[in-house]
Image: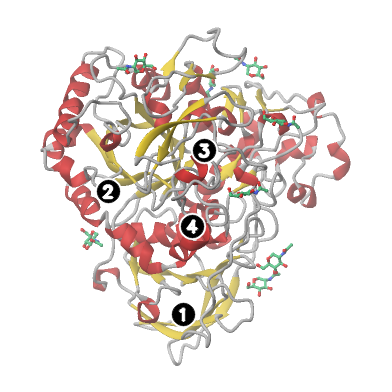
Amino acid sequence: MVLPKYGVGLLSLAGAALAQVTIYGQTPLAQTKTDGSWAAMTTLAAYNDTFLTPPAAPNPAASNNFAIQLTKDAAQVEGISIAHNGPSFYGFSIEMSVITQILGKNSSYLQVPFLNLMANIQERAGGVYVRLGGNTQEFATMVEEGDSRLSPGHTFGKEISGSTQTTLTPAVLYTRDMFYIANNISSLVNVKWFLGIPFNDSVNWRIGIAEEGQQILGTNLVGLQAANEPDFYVTFGRRTAPYTPADYSREIGELIDYMGKSPKITNTKMLIGPSVSGQNDNWHAQDVFATGFLDDYADYLVAITVEHYPNNNCIAMYSPAGTPGAVVPQDVLPDYLNHGKVTDLAGSYTQDANTAVKYNKPFIMFEMNTASCGGFPGISDTFTSTLWALDYGLQMAFQNTTHALLHVGGQNVYYNPFTAPPTNQSAYNEWTIGPIFYSALVIAEAFGKSNTAQIVDRYANEGSANTPAYAIYENGVLSKAALFNYIDDDTGNNDLTVALTVDGGVPSSVSVKYLLAPSINEKRNITWAGQTFGEKFKVDGRLRGDLNVTNIPCDATNNVCRIPVPSPGFALVFFSSSDEQLTISQAPHTFATTAYSKAHNTVQYDPAVVATSNGHNAGLLAQKLGSTSPGALKNGASAGLVSVALTAVVLSFGGAVWTVLSS
Ligand SMILES: *[C@@H]1O[C@H](CO)[C@@H](O)[C@H](O)[C@H]1NC(C)=O
Ligand SMILES: *[C@@H]1O[C@H](CO)[C@@H](O)[C@H](O)[C@H]1NC(C)=O
Ligand SMILES: *[C@@H]1O[C@H](CO)[C@@H](O)[C@H](O)[C@H]1NC(C)=O
Ligand SMILES: *[C@@H]1O[C@H](CO)[C@@H](O)[C@H](O)[C@H]1NC(C)=O
Ligand SMILES: *[C@@H]1O[C@H](CO)[C@@H](O)[C@H](O)[C@H]1NC(C)=O
Ligand SMILES: *[C@@H]1O[C@H](CO)[C@@H](O)[C@H](O)[C@H]1NC(C)=O
Ligand SMILES: *[C@@H]1O[C@H](CO)[C@@H](O)[C@H](O)[C@H]1NC(C)=O
Ligand SMILES: *[C@@H]1O[C@H](CO)[C@@H](O)[C@H](O)[C@H]1NC(C)=O
């Protein structure tokens, strides 16, 4: 079979109807297929067991005792980033087609693991951005509750729309309840939402999502994406050629006019664009800016955005096994363990980010992950992705990107930060954490809540690709150092000892939190300061184990703190022993997990209980009901309580009683 650069093919897939899919050629695509059928696999991608061979460790060991001279005062640091503020640097981008799995079936059935995961980010950074959208937003259609195309009690449904010529993007049908799901989540955890206006039709605008979103979500809605990768619209048959940056700009003007006429739109000034992928010969953000986009519409934009994946797994995911041209994960593995690659990636957007600085707008990498079309087995789902996304995130922040949203798909992708169990397993399996989620957690902690974090790449160890280091400042003063070791070597020969010196002197000791795994291949046993989210199918969104912060005495006489960094590993060095982030472990406000037994799979909880519950004790509710979380059991609730019929206790403290379930 000859592969066209872009073409349409018909694949017969196990258990699925004949699906029209796009077959992509060599060209990396940012668009991620998130729906319909994927190449048949024996195990769902999210649970795949592929391990790759780590790149050989340098032998003899590379320079592993090096010094970094740090400057105390941010004002003296050349090239330091802007101050990062607002919610956590990493947020999440959730395809509309998986909202049910990730957020909940309807506004009274929310997914507890999602709430707990967001609570853990909030605890560190104050809040989280979540975008509902992706390819599916273009054809998403709001229908009335009870529409016959929805299953009873469901907020979402799908119908194969056949609505594009080149991609199978089932139209997502949703009801008004989607906004209540989002708003109810925001009433429990500080999540702020981005939604996307469908752009498949610029003549008959469908702005229901903007109208209802503004009415129902109020200030929890922070932005409306106007077009998703418009530079691909001709390729995907959403516009006829020529469709230029000027056409896109003109459409934004038309959309603004149209929105201005709707009595249900309270705010026309929360658009987000241009969200170009800037791939290959496609247009780039600067081409859009050159049309006068920013001068004309800056007042209407709340953020400037791009979307980019550094590679793609489209052929392996879409085409029959053996189709030539597929990227071989083993070949590209070293790209994800290399600081130079990360620097170059972020560097492609420095100009755009600095344009945003000039217009005083946030610059958001609106959709990203390790690779589009599901990511790579053995890369996107291992500690490799943890270190990569941590380095890339810090590097983007150094180059003035303000936020980045990690894309989340279904069980059929490798790259998810978190994955709900397949619906027919939700009675007995819990969630699975993706290694990349730890990056979001660690950056949230590294930047904290002061809204003043600035970061600079120290080009450590003579700019080594293996051992990058950053310095982080808060309130204008050095607060932390971030030290990486990408080398996979369990002999200890490549463990680092980094000698940190601070002008003006080091403190008598520093506190260190380590991000560790036995190897870059590790998929589950990843710890952050001693705590972990746990094994496949066992995650309820709460960190387990005891917090372990390492105190390292410094040599004040010689102005040096020697910090060990294992290979592989990452160390976050806190210069202030009173840094509030040092004491943060599991967020105190958590949500008791649902019980995963077929007979009793609902837990009802009252928001008032949640507000007063204590994480380590898994909350009043868990004490009463028991919990399936080993961490919680260890910390209080007794195992015997688990067998108490979970549905027997309905808590009602005067407020609404919420039911939380996992399917
Ligand atoms: C994991 O993914 C690889 C690549 O798609 C595939 O060859 C392998 O069969 C999968 N493993 C399982 C257990 O499904
Ligand atoms: C846009 O999508 C909607 C919903 O799927 C559909 O009804 C409409 O016909 C589409 N418009 C165009 C021009 O494709
Ligand atoms: C939400 O889903 C639950 C579980 O299926 C169902 O019992 C409930 O009636 C649904 N709520 C609404 C408003 O449809
Ligand atoms: C949750 O959603 C329901 C609609 O199903 C709504 O009546 C209720 O007010 C919402 N609660 C909050 C706190 O937003
Ligand atoms: C980030 O913005 C600051 C402030 O405008 C500037 O000094 C710095 O050079 C920018 N960083 C990069 C990598 O361009
Ligand atoms: C769950 O559903 C999938 C796909 O619909 C099916 O292949 C699988 O056999 C089901 N598993 C169980 C345990 O029912
Ligand atoms: C988990 O990883 C740590 C090192 O990071 C190691 O000491 C421990 O033995 C591992 N545990 C398991 C169960 O593999
Ligand atoms: C805490 O972490 C340090 C550094 O990884 C390790 O040496 C120590 O054994 C850990 N302590 C506990 C109690 O796990």
Residue under numbered circle 3: 409
Q: Is residue 397 visible?
A: no
Observer-nearest of 281 and 554: 281
Residue under numbered circle 4: 445
Q: Earlier in the sequence, mark 3 or mark 2?
A: 2
Amino acid at circle 1: Pro
Q: Earlier in the sequence, mark 1 or mark 4?
A: 4
Write down the quadrant of residue 470 in the picture: bottom left
Q: Earlier in the sequence, mark 3 or mark 4?
A: 3
Residue under numbered circle 2: 280
State the CA–CA distance, disc 3 to disc 1.
Answer: 45 Å
Write down the quadrant of residue 495 in the picture: bottom right
Q: Position of residue 421 (x, y in %)?
A: 66, 37
Verify CB contact (< 8 Å) between mark 4 and mark 2.
Answer: no
Amino acid at circle 2: Asn
Marker disc for residue 507 = 1
Is the CB atom of the residue marked by disc 3 within 8 angstroms of ligand 1's nearest atom?
A: no
Q: Earlier in the sequence, mark 3 or mark 1?
A: 3
Q: Which quadrant is the N terminus positioned in?
A: top left
Is the CB atom of the residue marked by disc 2 within 8 angstroms of ligand 5's nearest atom?
A: no
Residue in the picture at 37% in, 23% down: 164
Verify CB contact (< 8 Å) between mark 3 and mark 2.
Answer: no
Q: Which quadrant is the C terminus positioned in?
A: top right
